[in-house]
Amino acid sequence: MNSRSTIFGSEDTKEVRYAPWLIKEHTFKHSMGFMGACTLGHFAWSITVPCNIMALGFVANWSRRCYQILTSCINKIELHEDGEKVTIFTNLGKEFVVKISDIKKL
């Protein structure tokens, strides 16, 4: 017998899934920074290398932020039989067993 009951399950829903708002926001901001750095590099030959490094920084920061957002998404929450612990499943398939009293809203 399963000692856990599902409280929340994202795979059970029929809703259309969209990219999270934070990813859209980071994509817009970082693409504007990337294009600005590339444009600035085309205006003056003496600062081409620093502008390329700056553009690379925007791309690296964008990918790091999006990775953080996407890996912290919760797909499923199961309540244990004792009523004191839950199992949280993330996007990457990791499971975390935590006490309900230890969960804090961010």
Image (cartoon, grey):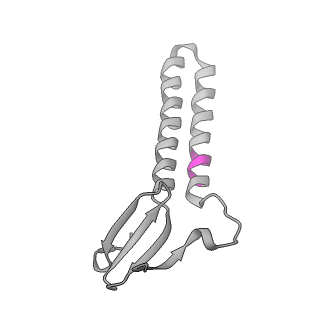
For the N terminus, the image quarter is bottom left
Residue at image location 52% in from the left, 14% down from the top: 46
Q: Is residue 104 left or right of residue 16?
A: left
Farthest front residue? Answer: 1
Q: Residue at x 57, y 14 (%)?
A: 45
Residue 105 showing in the rendered view: no
- Residue 5 coordinates in the image, percent (x, y): 46, 81
Above or below, comparing residue 42 to residue 90 in the picture: above
Q: Position of residue 59 (x, y in %)?
A: 53, 36
| Residue nearest the viewer, comparing 67 with 14 | 14
Front in this rendered view, residue 79 or 43: 79
- Disc count in the image? 0
Q: Is residue 7 magenta?
A: no
The span shown in magenta is 25-29
State the predominant SS element of the stretch in magenta.
helix
Tell me the quarter of the picture where residue 10 sits.
Answer: bottom right
> Relative to residue 102, is residue 19 depicted above or below?
above
Residue in the picture at 57% in, 30% down:
37
